[in-house]
Image (cartoon, rainbow, N blue to C red):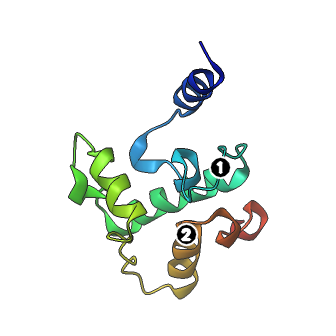
Amino acid sequence: MDKDEWMLLENILSCVGTYRYMSPEVYGYPPRGPRQKPTAQIDVYSAGLVLWEIVERRLVHSEFGPKSFDHVTFFYDFWNGLYELEQVQCNAETLKNLIARCAKALPDQRPTLKECY
């Protein structure tokens, strides 16, 4: 196996989780060279999506399949600016803002774990 094949295999094997809740940087967004090391911001993103579901009482990204998530179409739409997470319908502005910040595409735009607490 050459270096490129090993890198591809490493990327495939290091991408674990449920596609619906994966943060964009886990699947290589934005495209900026080698995949970044995991940080707490990955968990902040996923937690934001779970909070979104609790408030909305429905499955996040359900338009891409409620049971069998079409991650290929989702990633394509997301990467090409065709999809953005719908803002949560909530009267509690603090919670609404927290969820929106947690679900930002770029990890440096998300709150820290301490800020979430």
- Tell me which amino acid carries mark 2: Lys
Element at label 2:
loop
| Residue 53, percent from left and from top | 38, 60
Q: Position of residue 97 (x, y in %)?
A: 55, 81
Along the line of sight, which residue is nearer the eye, 1 or 67? 1
Q: Residue at (46%, 56%) from the top-left corner? A: 50
Q: Say left or right for 109 vs 87.
A: right
Is residue 16 shown above or below 61?
Answer: above
Rendered-image quadrant of the C terminus:
bottom right
Quarter of the N terminus within the rendering = top right
Q: In the image, is 4 to the left or to the right of 75?
A: right
Q: Name the residue beneath numbered marker 2.
A: 104
Residue at x-position 54% and y-position 34%? 15
Q: Nearer the viewer, mark 1 or mark 2?
A: 1
Task: Give the x, y percent position of residue 14.
Answer: 59, 30
In the picture of the structure, the residue carrying the numbered disc 1 is 33
Give the alpha-carbon distance from disc 1 to disc 2, as whole Å: 20 Å
117 or 85, nearer to the observer: 85
Q: Residue 108, position in %: x, y?
A: 70, 67
- In the picture, measured across the screen, residue 109 lies left or right of residue 9, that is right
Mark 1 lies on a secondary structure that is loop
Relative horizontal placement of residue 36, taking residue 75 as reference (left or right): right
Residue 116, relative to residue 90: is it above or below? above
Amino acid type for the residue under numbered disc 1: Gly
Q: Residues within 10 Å of mark 2 (few under 14, many from 20)?
A: some
